[in-house]
Amino acid sequence: MEWFVNVLIVHDREDVGREIESLVHALCSKAKVHLVDDASTARARLADLYYDLLIIDLTIPVVSGRGSHDFRVAEGLLEELFASPVLLNPGNILGITKDESALDNVQNNIGPHLMAVIAEKDGSPWRKQLSDRVRYVLESGKSRSRSLSTKHELDLLIVTALDKELSPFREFFQLEQNRATPGLHDFVFTDRNGQPRRGACFAIGRAGQPSAASETQGLICQLRPRLAIMTGFCGGVPNKADLGDVLFAGSAFDWDYGKWKPSEQAARLYSRPEPVVIRNSRTHRVARQLVEQGIQDPKSLNAQVALLSKGEVLEPKLRLVPFASGSAVIGDPNVLVDIKSLNEDIGGVDMESFGFYFACKYPHAAPPEFLCIKSVADECGPEKDDRLHASCSYSSAYIARVIATELWEFDSEGNN
C-alpha cells in the first residue's frame, strides 16, 4: 500500500518547481503536492496544514514579483517555523538553491534547520540527489507509520472517569504534570523484576461511555501503552457481588444498545449488546490468578479500606465477572432485572467499561493489553450515596498497582 504524503514546494521559478513536483509524483503517485513561489504564501500554507516534506528554494522573495531574492527571506521563514506556535513544523525540510552565495551561508545560518541542501547546478546530478532524499523521506514515513501501529512506547496507562477515582494514585506514585497534555500525569514505577517503568494516568473528569471511549482512544494513539487499566467504583448486582468487592471485568456488555418498542404499559428496551471480552488474554489470566490466590499481603489494603469505609467494608473479595455498561446510573431494580437477562453472571454495572474496552480493543495504534477494575459502591437501587466512593477508589487502584508492580511482565509478549 502506497503511503500518502503532503508535500509543500516553495520555488520562485515555475519550471523548476513543476519539475520537482513531477519528481515527487513519480516516487509517490498519491502525494498531495502544493507549489508556491514566495515566502508569504508558504507561510499561509504552513499555518493551515501539516506537511510531511517541505522542499524550499533558499532564495525566494517575500511576495512574488516584489523585493529581492535573498537567502535571508528563507532563513526568516524557517526560524519563524521553528519558533512560532502558529506554524506547523513539517516532518522533513530539504533546501535547494542555484545561488552559490546562498550555499556559503547555509552552514551557519539555515543549515541546522535542514535535512539536506542540494545545489541546483547545470550538469550536476541534483535531480538524482533530490530523488534519493525524497525517497528516504517516503521510506522513513512508512517505517514510522508501521511503528505507530505495532510498537508500544509507554509501559502503563491508568484511566479513571472521575478525579476522586484517580486520587489514590497520588499516594502510590509521584505524579508529574505532563508538559504536552493538560490533565495527563507522568510517573515512574518499578516492576516485578526491579526494572524502572514509565507510566501515565488521566482522569476524564466525567462519567459516561462517549467520554471514556473518546479519551481512551486518544490517549492510546498518543502514548501507545503496553498495558491500559481503568479503575474506580461501580454498582454491584445483588447475589453476584457484595459492597466493597473488587471486580475484574471479564467482559463489558453495552446493555442499553438496542431498540425501544412500545407496549401496553410503557415502552421497553430490547437490548442488542455486542460485548467486548478479555478471555484468553494476559490480563484475563492475571485476574484469574488474583481471584484464585489473592494478593500476597492483604493486611495493608484491608486496613485502609476499613478506615475509609468507616468499618463497613473489612475484607473486600476479588471477583472476575461480566460488566453491564450503559449511559445512565441504574437506580431501579426493574431495570436491573432486564440487565441480568443479558447474562446471568453479570456482577458489575457502570458507565465506562464498554467504552474503555472498545477503545482498547479497536485502537488506531498499537493495541494494548487492557483491564477494567472497579469496586462495588452500591447495589444499583434507589438508595445511592457516595459513602463508599473513597474506599472503592482506593481498593481498585491498589489492585491495579499490585498488577503493575508485582505481577505484570512488561517485556513479555506471551504469558505472565
Image: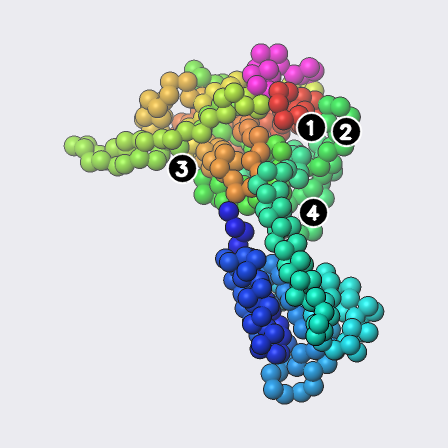
Residue at 47% across, 35% down: 358
Determine whether the residue tagged by mark 3 lies in a helix, strand or loop.
Answer: loop
Question: How far is mark 2 from mark 4, CA to CA?
Answer: 23 Å
Instruction: State the residue position of label 2.
Output: 195
Residue 177 is labelled as 4
Q: Amino acid at mark 4?
A: Gln
> Residue shown at 18%/33% (left/top)?
263
Asked if the residue at tag 1 contacts the one at tag 2, i.e. Cβ–Cβ closer than 8 Å, the answer is yes
Q: Residue furthest top?
A: 292
Residue segment shown in magenta: 285-299
Residue 250 visible in the shown view: yes
Q: Earlier in the sequence, mark 1 or mark 3?
A: 3
Q: Residue at x 62, y 33 (%)?
A: 226
Residue 192 spot, x, y in % from top left: 73, 23
* Of labels 3 and 2, the one closer to you: 2
Q: Residue furthest bottom?
A: 66
Q: Earlier in the sequence, mark 2 or mark 1?
A: 2
Name the residue: 78% across, 77% down. 100
Q: Is residue 162 magenta?
A: no
The kind of secondary structure element at disc 1 is: loop
- Residue identifier under label 1: 411
Using the image as rendered, state which of residue 90 and residue 235 is in the foreground.
Answer: 90
| Label annotation for residue 328 | 3
x, y percent for residue 31: 53, 59
Quadrant placement of the C terminus:
top right
The answer to the question of whether label 3 and label 2 lie on touching residues, with beta carbons closer than 8 A, is no
Three-letter amino acid code of the residue under disc 3 = Ala
Instruction: Give the label, 1 or 3, closer to the camera.
Output: 1
Q: Please, what is the three-letter code of the amino acid marked with disc 1?
A: Asp
Question: First in sequence: mark 4 or mark 3?
Answer: 4
Q: State the colouring used for the structure image.
A: rainbow
Kindly identify which numbered label has been placed on residue 31.
Answer: none
